Image: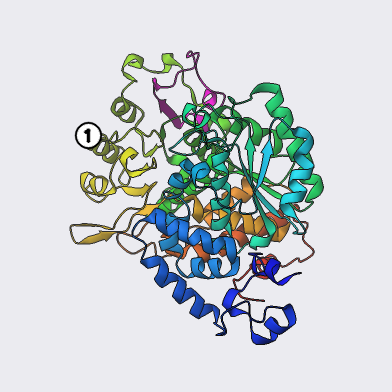
Amino acid sequence: MKAHELLNNPFLNKGTAFTMEERKELGLIGLLPPYVQTIEEQAAQTYAHMERKTTDLEKRLFLMEIFNTNRTLFYYLFSQHLEEFNPIVYDPTISETIENYSDLFVDPQYAGYLDINHPENIEETLKNAAGDRHIRLIVVTDAEEILGIGDWGTNGVDISVGKLMVYSGAAGIDPATVLPLVIDAGTNRKALLDNPNYLGNRHERVTGETYYDFIDKFVQTAEKLFPKLYLHWEDFGRSNAAKILEKYRKKIPTFNDDIQGTGIVTLGGLYGSLEISGEKLTDQIYVCYGGGTAGAGIASRVHREMVNEGLSEDEAYKRFFMVDKQGLLFDDMDDLTPEQKPFAKKRSDFTNPDKMTSLLEVVKTVKATILVGTSTNPNSFTKEIVEVMCENSAHPMIFPLSNPTKLAEAKAEDLIKWSDGKAFVATGIPADTVSYKGVDYVIGQANNALIYPGLGLGMLASEASLLTDEMIGSAARALSGIIDMKKAGAPVLPPFKYVAEVSIKVAEAVAKKAQEQGLARSEEKDMAKAVRELKWYPKYR
């Protein structure tokens, strides 16, 4: 490899850390300043430079320059500052770079761009994007429904890049083995179609058979080229996400974070709450406020866990009530999605069905003990609703998960005060510790990054042939036990600063369950060892 090619390869470049021996051997003499830095010196220098940036967007753009030139240094820094960097390199700052992706385009970041108009190019695209790397993990998006900001066409490739950064930063998945992809199926966002700088296909989204044929060809080609692949779907539209997952989840190792990730981390929060209260999941009454992809996905996940814990499907469904824009969902409504239908109720089961458009009335009537919000309807969990929840349960579980902050169903501080410290609270956005009557209540964040990196590491280490409900249940249970739950005010989910530790625990739980179920194909039979050996550390080779 020529010297300049080496310096421009982010997977091999060490910058000023190349030793004098390496510089001689690789033809780098005179191409770098003479002082040889350690990675620690490079990181301190880079961090100090980043701190001079005044906005998170500027910080992200600066860190992306490091990512584009030296992956090892980037991840060394990221692993030292996971809690601080996560909102900068990923959500919420990433929204701004997605919106401006075409205007600011500098570097494709080893991503692949799949064009719906050229299915014949799928194989060539994947081969070119992978180069000589052995790909184990793909994150693919079609960017139709990026959380909170909607349809961003080919700009959405940034979400795949960002997601994989968290996989590598939190769980130590080798960045040389991952591939971010976007399926450019067009966009329905007029502002993009009218933007002369827009880099994607300038037509409305392709749907129907053409779209699904393309997806199928992509899956088959990726499976053929990368035989040890784990495939992660991200930010697909409401109508496609569940359909795609359902088609492939029993055939290949695959995962949809929007449908499954939030469900697993929410389930983990419920288990954390129940560990403190000593109650059983199967005794709870669950109200889901917001019946979209996330809300229905979470409810479905918790329902399956109740079935795993001994209830019949029907008995479990009786404990779930789904409220969407129409109010409580009834089975005679003609606009229910396939994911909502199993949760819809009969009007004849209620003495007051006409009043069931009110969330307060639903919570009161069904005696809810769990209230999970994914509605993006701000401040909809009122003081009155919280007081009713406290009448229904000594320790109600109230999780306002919508984000960003301005769309949250309630503030954590209000929920603690209105419930007189009785409610178990988890939020969708980071929340400050709440001091109330002498107790510091640490608020757990239902952050999918507590789950999906470790889940991926466990899948890859075990080489599991499928991701099953039982493996998902094991991942959720692995979230408890990281912190002391007996302490007053303990969070129901571990704080994000523990994510590296959490990821290993989740990975081991998932890998062991895969082995128990006869799905692990790894030659290594000790799953804890397999996880430890696969974990990548950002050190110069």
What residue lies at 45% left-to-right and 57% top-to-bottom? 60
Amino acid type at mark 1:
Glu
Kindly identify which residue carries mark 1.
Answer: 384
Q: Is residue 531 left or right of residue 338?
A: right
Q: Place residue 516 in its image quadrant.
A: bottom right
What residue lies at 61% left-to-right and 50% top-to-bottom? 108
* Image quadrant in which the C terminus is located: bottom right
Q: Is residue 333 visible?
A: yes
Q: Please, which residue is most extreme toward the right here?
A: 224
Query: Of residues 529 and 163, which is closer to you in this image?
Result: 163
What residue lies at 77% left-to-right and 49% top-to-bottom? 127
Q: Is residue 492 visible?
A: no
Within the magenta stretch, is there residue 15?
no
Q: Is residue 6 left or right of residue 379?
A: right
Q: Please, which residue is most extreme toward the left here?
A: 437
Q: Which residues are magenta?
A: 316-342
Q: Give the mark count.
A: 1
Query: Of residues 49 and 288, which is closer to you in this image?
Result: 49
Within the magenta stretch, is there residue 338?
yes
Q: Please, which residue is most extreme toward the front here?
A: 30
Residue 58 location, x and y as percent? 40, 56
* Image quadrant in which the N terminus is located: bottom right
